[in-house]
């Protein structure tokens, strides 16, 4: 049997419709779903419990949930909004990994975190988002250093054609300089945005195959030459 056909996942999202479509496409024997907010501990607890009860173990986590909100100049920053961003982009990942730790130790499992180029580069008004992703990179680095049985890596997906990009053009551009916003408008109009399948392929292959010891704890871009075999 093709190895790929035996892979099993537990998917988390706020949209039940999308999760049901995933289950219908691949079958209930291969897909478990949890409808909920990743920043809610109950959601992560349910996902970990379902993975173990339905499939017996946890081999990998792909931490993909993230929000780009609170795009604004410094004097107009909303700290309560920042806290919500950190809850989703950082603390939800920390919580899920923490709850999964006993299982990941058993399987010498992989943690693949979806980071961002904004974690190492400044963008107009992206104080909150960039800070959450920079902190995520450090969490992954620390995880790899402290949990020797577990493999952890942080990978930026590039500029991807998702709802987040639509939000940048239509909403968040108001908190950016004209030049900063225009870059994303131009990427869309000239069809330079990546298909989600491009970085998704890298993430899935990392989760399935693992990576060399020297990459553990690293922050990389999806198209880094050292990740060529995962494309």
Image: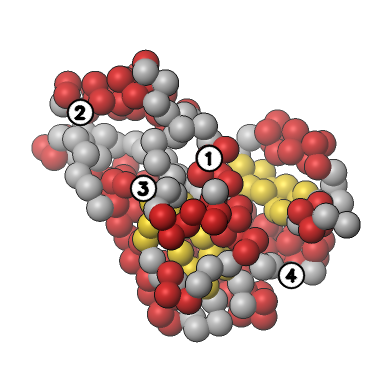
Report the quarter where the N terminus lies. bottom right
Name the residue at the left extreme.
Answer: 75
Distance, label 3 to label 4, CA atoms, is: 29 Å
Q: Earlier in the sequence, mark 2 or mark 1?
A: 2
Q: Earlier in the sequence, mark 3 or mark 4?
A: 4
Q: Nearer the viewer, mark 4 or mark 2?
A: 2
Quickly name the residue at label 2. 180
Quickly name the residue at label 4. 57
Distance, label 1 to label 4, CA atoms, is: 27 Å
**SS state under label 2:** helix
Q: Nearer the viewer, mark 3 or mark 1?
A: 1
Query: Is disc 1 surrounded by few (<14), some (14 to 19) or many (20+) residues within 10 Å?
Result: some
Residue 61 image offset from top left, x and y in percent: 59, 61
Please tell me in which quadrant of the rendered image residue 127 appears. Answer: top left
Label drawn at residue 116: 3
Label drawn at residue 198: 1
Residue 147 image offset from top left, x and y in percent: 49, 81
Closest to the observer, 138 or 93: 138
Distance, label 2 to label 1, CA atoms, is: 25 Å
């Amino acid at each position: 049997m093709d190895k790929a056909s035996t892979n099993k996942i537990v998917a988390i999202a706020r949209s039940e419709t999308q999760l049901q479509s995933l289950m219908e496409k691949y079958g209930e024997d291969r897909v478990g779903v949890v409808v909920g907010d990743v920043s809610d501990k109950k959601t992560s607890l349910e996902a970990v419990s379902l993975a173990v009860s339905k499939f017996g173990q946890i081999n990998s986590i792909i931490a993909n949930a993230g929000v780009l909100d609170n795009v604004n100049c410094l004097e107009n920053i909303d700290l309560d909004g920042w806290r919500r961003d950190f809850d989703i982009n950082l603390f939800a990942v920390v919580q899920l990994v923490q709850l999964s730790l006993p299982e990941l130790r058993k399987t010498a499992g992989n943690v693949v975190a979806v980071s961002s180029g904004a974690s190492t580069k400044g963008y107009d008004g992206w104080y909150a988002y960039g800070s959450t992703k920079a902190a995520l990179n450090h969490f992954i680095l620390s995880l790899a250093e402290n949990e020797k049985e577990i493999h952890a890596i942080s990978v930026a997906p590039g500029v991807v054609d998702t709802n987040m990009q639509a939000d940048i053009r239509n909403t968040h551009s108001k908190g950016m300089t004209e030049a900063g916003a225009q870059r994303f408008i131009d990427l869309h109009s000239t069809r330079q945005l990546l298909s989600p399948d491009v970085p998704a392929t890298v993430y899935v292959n990392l989760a399935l195959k693992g990576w060399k010891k020297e990459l553990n704890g690293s922050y990389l871009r999806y198209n880094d030459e050292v990740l060529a075999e995962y494309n």
